[in-house]
Amino acid sequence: MDLSTAFFLGLIQGITEFLPVSSSGHLTLAEHFLGLSLEDGILLFNVLSHFGTLLVILFFFWRDVWAFRRPLFWGTLPLFFFVPLFKLIKASFGVPSLLGISFAFTASILFLGDRVRFTLSQKWHPLFVGLAQTVALFPGVSRSGMTISSARILGWSADEAIKFSFLLAVPATMGALILEGWHLYKEGAEALPIAWEPLLLATITSFVVGLFSLRLIKTLGRMGKLGYFAWYCLAIAGLTLMLL
């Protein structure tokens, strides 16, 4: 992977990570049309570019991580049951033809989050949002879309839903980094499929662009405009189904 490609993909990650449109889906789509595959190390690349946007979350919300430790634990718990499916999830990143369905699913959840409300005991809220997050392990299903919408369905304000959604990304992203790091450790240093320069550039790019993207989604959330992203996901779902 050359530096211009790494910069372009890092730009996509930085823009789409905090918007409820699935950064993994956009990365997978872009990598498909750029001719990249799992053999080129795109999963490692994607995880490390997510590390850049993880730093953005820590930059804005580092004071809240410890304060939210209990709900974060319950929100992260469902992910542990999907660790045995890691190989299946990893393989799904090599099947871009599934993206159209995933984008359409994201659109439907965003529509629901904008319109549906139901009551659930507050002690179950973090677990409910965490269960929604597990669906977003597959590319094309937006993690922020799933978690923000599920919190909104429970009656949370947009600010509360957005904050918890991004805090929930901290253990999820760290877990993905640990799994990939363990895989590389077992395979040996020679298994690193991409040079460090593109990885570093993509991480820095996603961090810088993500700073602006997170501010944008917080502003749009306060304005009640999150539902508009459902139409975008629906449009890109149709386009993806036609192209793939």
Image (tube, rainbow, N blue to C red):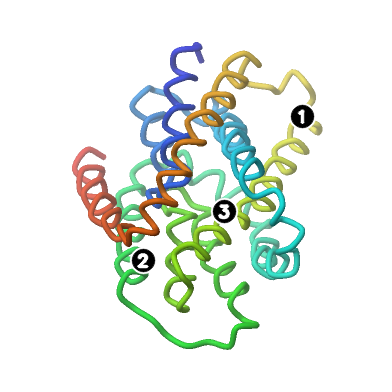
> Pointer 3: what residue?
166
Question: Residue 207: image x %, image y %?
Answer: 56, 31
Residue 45 position by quadrant? top right
At x 56%, y 51%, the residue is 88
Q: Which residue is mark 1?
A: 187
Q: Would residue 166 be found to the left or right of residue 238 on screen?
A: right
Residue drawn where x is 69% and y is 69% of the image: 71
Q: Which one is closest to the eye, mark 2 or mark 3?
A: 3
Other-residue count near label 3 (Cα within 10 Å), few / some / many at <14 / 14–19 / ≥20: many
Image coordinates of residue 77 in percent, x first then y, are 70, 66
Point out the tag, 1 or 2, that comes first from the N-terminus.
2
How far apart, in angstroms, are the residues tagged by discs 2 and 3?
A: 18 Å
Q: Amino acid at mark 2?
A: Ile
The number of callouts visible is 3
Give the mark nearest the N terminus, 2 or 3: 2
In the image, taking residue 83 as reference, residue 19 lies left or right, namely left
Left or right of 64 on screen, residue 91: left
| Residue 4 place in picture, x, y as percent | 44, 13
Residue at 32%, 69% in the rendered image: 114
